[in-house]
Structures are given as structure tokens and as C-alpha cells.
Image: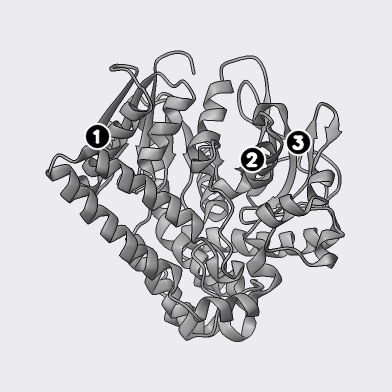
Amino acid sequence: MNGQRVLTLVGAGGVRSPLFLQAARRRGFRGEIRLYDIDRTRMELMQRVGRLLLAREGSLPGEIVVTASHDLEHALRGTDAVVAAIRPGGLSRRALDEETAFSLGVLGQETVGVCGIAMASRTLPALVEIAREARRLGNRPWFFNFTNPVGITTLGLHLQGFSRVLGICDSANQALYAACRFLGLDPDDVAPETFGLNHLSWTRALWHEGRDVLGGLLRDPRFRETYQDLFQEPELREHGLFFNEYLYYYLWPERALQEMADGPLRGAWLAKEEARLVKDLEERLASGAAEQALDRFLAYHAGRSETYMAYARKGRHAHPGAETSGAEGYAGVALDVLQRSGRDGERVRVLVVPPRDGLPPGMPDGAAVEVSCRIGRGMPEPLTGRPIPEWCGKRIRQVGACERWVAESILEGDRNKLARALELHPLVGPKKAPACLEAFSWN
């Protein structure tokens, strides 16, 4: 990436923030990356780990200037881009959400269903305040939203009048990066054709040199077992689609509920493991064992990726995570957009974009959607593409309507819209909605 630019990472106390610095280095970023978090101790710890990771990557002094601030105004003043990855309430609040859902017999997963809606009630108001400050203080900054649930929060920012907002998510580009790893291709040379909502999307083509390579991959048992292991049923394979892994919850909610209930819930497990990681990092850095601290950090992320959705994979490891396989996860997508915003040339990535014209026929009105976008100069443009299959469109439109009501209910304080959203949502429904409405804290 050419030129000296300023990026601000909000939520930098999160354990993935050093990976953002690593991705920036690999993408050739030059300039300042400002870290901001309300938890000063955690932010400074992640800053130390990030600098160690940059050094291991071969970053020279002055190439990337990493600063940390506990003052939001200082962190945002003059910034060119904001990447927001916040979690009000921390992992302990996620764990409580999941426990509450399971006590009601409702599928509890951080970003889908009632737990995702509860999380949105905390994250969206905080994001709106951050975006307002960024617009006031920044250099017409891009606002890259990696705060879950990405679809609802991106839509909410749009409804509040923020125009330079894009939602980014690791899972959105799963098919693209899986194919490139498997075939040894450059992601810049492949154009995915993806449609849906965040965590409710399908990819139906991967175009390389005028040819769709996805069909052949889906017929390859090795590719399916590695990257579509959750969707091996013959009736699903007949559709010729690459399924986002979160579709597992929508296709088999009762099965997922039972499988998740048989073991420790993900939120509680992560809270425990992350606390252990932080303690180990602090101890090793305090004793001068910097390299051992960095090794511990990287091992944690490798293990976290391997255990994802382990209850559904029946002992099989998860496929390689974006950060460990060269895609650089959410950081890579944000940097892809920034690299092209002022230059000629194009690439195609899957982004979460606010309601707009030019979407594939059959997509919902009024929702933030997850679609393939052409990235070049200016705002990324969705690729119109072919009409989407109706069996996909029906579910997309149902959940899209729920997400619109959720975003509006949070911004307007309208409890009736929240109730309607819960009743309509396929993972909650009218029978469970009243209990969910009473049991959860919606802020």
C-alpha cells in the first residue's frame, strides 16, 4: 500500500488486534496504526505482542508506526480509516447470553438468533457514537465494521446516515480463500459470486480466467471434506453451492442445539482460554521471554481455529483459519479496499453493504446484504449477477426483515419491533419469543 496513511483500530484490546498489524505488514502498509480501547491494560499488552509480531515479520523501524491511546478523540483525529471490532460486556456477557438461550431451549450462538440480537443491542449504540466522532474528527474516513452481528450493526450505521461504511467478516470470503489455497491461485485473480446476508450466504461461482472453478472443486472429495465437511448431504450437494459454515445453524437448528448442549458452551470456554492467554503473556513478557510470549499467542490462535464448531465436526479439525493461511481475515479485507480506493485496477471481494440498488434479483429490500463487490476507485460496487435461487431467497428475505426490525428497534427504542423480529426469526419463533423478550437484557 503506497503513501503514508493513518488507520485507527477501535477495540484494540481484543486478542486478534496483533494479527491486524501482521496483515498490514504483509500488505505493504506504510503509515501509522493507532490502537484504541477502553481497557488500557489489555490494549497495551496487545500493542507489545503486535510489535513483536511485526519484528518477526521483518518490519523495519518506521515502516509502520504503532501508537496506543486511551483517548478516543486523539485516536480518531485525522484518521483515514477506522476498523471497529468492539465487544461491550466482553466474553463474559457472550457466555451469559448463550447460557440464557439454552436455559430457554433456544439455539444460542454469538451472532445468529437471539444471542446475535442481544449482542446487537449492546454493540450498535456504541458503534454509532464511535462513527459520529470519526466523521467529526477524521479525514473523511472509511468505517470498516467488524463488530458482530455485522449485518445488523452495518445496517444500523447506515440508518444513522453514515455513508462510507462497509461490513467485513472472515466467513464472507470463505469460498474464495478456500479455492485459492486448494488450487494455488492468487485471490486477486478470482472473482467470487456470493449472495445472502452476513452468516447466511452462499457462493455459486468462482470465476478465474473466464471459467467457473467452483463446480469442479465441489465434485472433489478432498475439497468437500476440507472446506464443506458440514454439508455433505447429497441433497445439498445437488445445488452446486458453497455453503457458509454458519448455515449449519439454519439448516439443522435442533441438531445444533443438542450438539452444543452436550459440551461446554463456546462463550464460556473462550472466556476461560482467553484469560489464561492474557495471564501467560503478561508473565512471559514480565520475565523477558518475549519470543515465548509470541509463540504462545500464535499457538492460541491456531488452537482456537481448530476447535471452532468442534461439536458439529465430530472430531474433525476445522479448516485452516484465515489468519493462518494467508488471507489475513478481516484485516485483509479492509486493507484490500484501502489499497484500491485511490488506484486503478480492480478486485472482487465479498462485503456487507447497506441497502442499495444494483443487487442480484431476489435479494431483500432494506437490509444490509453480503454480496460480491467490485473494489476499485471510490465506494465498492455490488455485482448485480443472476437472480438468486428462490429457496435461498425466501430465507434471506425472512431474516433480512428481522434484522431491519432489530436495527430500528435499537435506534428507536421500539420494543414492539424487537418482539416482531424475535417472533419472525427462524431460530426463535412465536412460541419462544415472549420468554426471550423477558429473559435477555436488551442493552
Identify the mark at residue 329; answer none if there is no mark.
none
Identify the mark at residue 177; answer none if there is no mark.
2
Q: Quadrant of the C terminus?
A: bottom left
CA neighbours of label 3 inside 10 A, class few (<14), some (14 to 19), many (20+): some
Q: In the picture shown, does residue 220 fall above or below 80? A: below
**SS label for mark 3:** loop
- Residue at coordinates 74% horizontally, 64% vertically from top-left? 395
**SS label for mark 2:** helix
**Residue 57 in view in this figure:** yes
| Image depth: mark 1 or mark 3 in front | 1
Q: What residue type is labelled 2?
A: Tyr
Residue highlighted by disc 3 = 383
Q: Which of the marked residues, 2 or 1, is nearer the chain's N terminus?
A: 1
- Residue at coordinates 72% horizontally, 31% vertically from top-left? 190
- Residue at coordinates 75% horizontally, 64% vertically from top-left? 232
Residue highlighted by disc 1 = 68
Q: In which quarter of the image is residue 273?
A: bottom left
